[in-house]
Amino acid sequence: MNRKHSHQLEQVLTRIHEACRQSGRDPESVRLLAVSKTHPASAVSDLHELGQRAFGESYVDEAVAKIAELGTLDIEWHFIGPIQSNKTRAIAEHFDWVQGVDRAKVVRRLADQRPGDRSPLNVLIQVNIDDEPQKAGCRPDEIAALADMVAGYDTLRLRGLMAIPAPREDLEAQRVVFARLRALFEKLRESHPDADTLSAGMSADLEAAIAEGSTMVRIGTALFGARGAP
Ligand SMILES: *Cc1c(COP(=O)(O)O)cnc(C)c1O
C-alpha cells in the first residue's frame, strides 16, 4: 500500500468533513470524486484499496486504457473532460457518468450510443458559470432545454449540474460564484426533482463549494500530487 496516497486521502476527507461541519451539513451528503487523469492505473488501484470508488478522467483514450486495465474492480468512472463529438461512442460505452454535457448534439449521440445492456448513463449538464470563451459549458439560459432533452431518453439519466468557475483567491469570492451555481441547480430541481447532484469544488475551492451546497467535489492535485503532461 502506498502510504502517501493513504495520507492524502485522509487529509482530503478531513477537509470535506470539516467543511460540512462548518455548514451544518451531513458529511455523507458530499461525495468525493478522485480525479486520476494523467496518473497511472496503480494510483487508482491504491485509492480503491483504501475504499475510494468514484474516479474522474478527462482524456478518453487514456481513460479507456485504464478502465481496461482495472476491469475487474468495482469502480464508478466519470468522464469530466470537454466532449468532442467523435469521442461520444467511447464515453457512452465505457463510463458510468458524464459530467460535461453542454450541447444538444452530444446529448443525442450519447443517448443513441449508450449500449442497451448497460444501465442509463448518468448525465450532468456543464454550465459555463463565468461565461469564459475558452471553457466548455452551456449558458445558464440553455440549461432547461438541455435538461428536458436528457430526461427524454431512456438511455440517459439526468443527475444535475457541473461547473468549473474561474479561479478566485479568497473564500468569499469563491462562495459568490458557487451561490449563483446553487441557484441554477435549485431552479433545475423545480422541473426535475430527481436531479440530485451538484458537482462543484476542486482542490483549491472545495470549502467554498461545500458551503454553497455542492454534493460532489472533484479532487486531483490534493489526492495524487501535481500532474505532469498527459
Ligand atoms: C483536473 C480536473 C479537476 C481536478 O482539479 P484539481 O485542482 O487537481 O483538484 C476537477 N475537475 C475537472 C473538470 C478537471 O478537469
Image (cartoon, rainbow, N blue to C red):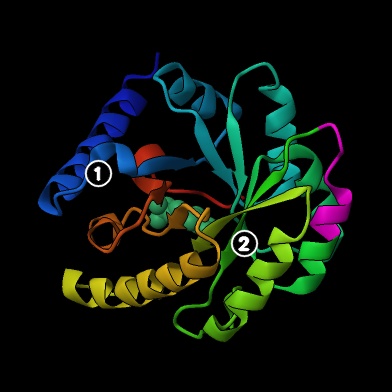
- Going 29% across and 33% down the picture, which residue do you hit? 8
Secondary element under disc 1, as helix, strand or loop, is helix
Quick one: label 1 or label 2, which is nearer the N terminus? 1
Secondary element under disc 2, as helix, strand or loop, is strand
Q: Nearer the viewer, residue 37 or 123?
A: 123
Residue 52 image offset from top left, x and y in percent: 43, 27
Image quadrant assignment for residue 214:
bottom left
Q: Amino acid at mark 2?
A: Gly
- Going 45% across and 16% down the picture, which residue do you hit? 49
Instruction: Please provide the residue range marked out in magenta.
Output: 109-117
Q: Mark 2 sits on what residue? A: 100
Viewed as shown, does residue 227 lie left or right of 133?
left
- Going 61% across and 73% down the picture, which residue do you hit? 136
Q: Kindly tell me whether residue 102 is visible in this rendering.
A: no
Q: Mark 1 sits on what residue? A: 16
Disc number at residue 198? none
